[in-house]
Image: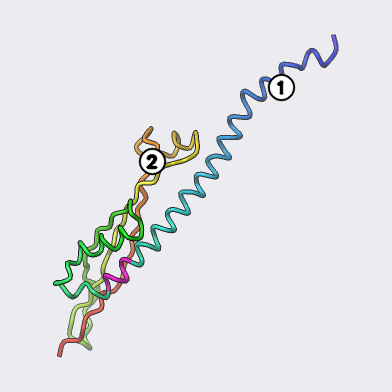
């Protein structure tokens, strides 16, 4: 029997076993790139929200929490942000406490490639993953006279 007839099943076995594994690896790499891109955009959006909040947080009449969410919705419609102020250090020269604005943003991201939807999804089988970004920004406050 010729070697051509004996090895004809090898191609089928390789296609059925090796190709899905290889494609899964390629799709995982591509999905990781997609998630990384979305996380970078979320980090930049959260930084912008924190920057605006850091300049206006000391003015309570602006409705701080609602305003920060409105700004985030204009940048990323699917994202939400929660901001709160946190004490940092007392400034003995200005005789006042300094505060940081901590903004925590979350965005649900749909996974787009097959197989990676199964492996990377949280909760399992949902086909999506929630990304979180945390940014700290000093709150600008006028010096007390």
Q: Which of 93 and 7 is in front in this view?
A: 7
The residue drawn where x is 39% and y is 60% is 43
Screen quadrant of the N terminus: top right
Which residue appears farthest toward the bottom when viewing the image? Answer: 145
Residue 69 sits in quarter: bottom left
Q: Which of 49 and 17 is in front in this view?
A: 49
- The percent position of residue 141, horizontal first and vertical second, equals 22, 80
How would you rate the neighbour count of disc 1 (Cα within 10 Å): few for under 14, some for 14-19, many for 20 or more? few
130 versus 133 height, above or below: above
Q: The magenta stretch spans which residues?
A: 49-54
- The percent position of residue 99, horizontal first and vertical second, equals 23, 73
- The percent position of residue 81, horizontal first and vertical second, equals 27, 57
Was residue 53 drawn as part of the magenta stretch in this picture? yes
Q: Nearer the viewer, residue 57 or 77?
A: 77
Task: Provide the residue designation for mark 2.
Answer: 128
Which residue appears farthest toward the right when viewing the image? Answer: 2
Q: Nearer the viewer, residue 136 or 49?
A: 49
Task: Provide the residue designation for mark 1.
Answer: 11
- Residue 61 horizontal side relative to residue 34, left or right: left
Residue 52 sits in quarter: bottom left
- Residue 23 horizontal side relative to residue 104, left or right: right
- Residue 56 horizontal side relative to residue 23, left or right: left
* Mark with earlier residue (2, 1): 1
Cα–Cα gap, marks 2 and 1: 35 Å
- The percent position of residue 116, horizontal first and vertical second, equals 48, 37
Screen quadrant of the C terminus: bottom left
The residue drawn where x is 35% and y is 53% is 132
144 versus 48 height, above or below: below
**Which secondary structure, mark 1?**
helix
**Which secondary structure, mark 2?**
strand
6 versus 29 height, above or below: above
């Amino acid at each position: 029997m010729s070697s051509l007839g004996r090895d004809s099943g090898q191609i089928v076995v390789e296609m059925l076993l090796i190709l899905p594994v290889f494609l899964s690896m390629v799709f995982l790499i591509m999905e990781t790139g997609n998630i990384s891109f979305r996380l970078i955009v979320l980090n930049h959006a959260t930084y912008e929200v924190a920057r605006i909040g850091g300049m206006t947080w000391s003015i309570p009449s602006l409705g701080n929490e609602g305003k920060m969410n409105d700004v985030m919705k204009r940048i990323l419609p699917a994202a939400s942000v929660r901001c709160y102020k946190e004490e940092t250090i007392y400034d003995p020269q200005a005789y006042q406490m300094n505060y940081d604005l901590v903004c925590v943003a979350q965005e649900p991201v749909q996974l787009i490639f097959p197989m990676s939807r199964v492996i990377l999804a949280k909760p399992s089988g949902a086909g999506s993953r929630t990304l979180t970004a945390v940014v700290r920004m000093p709150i600008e406050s006028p010096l007390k006279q």
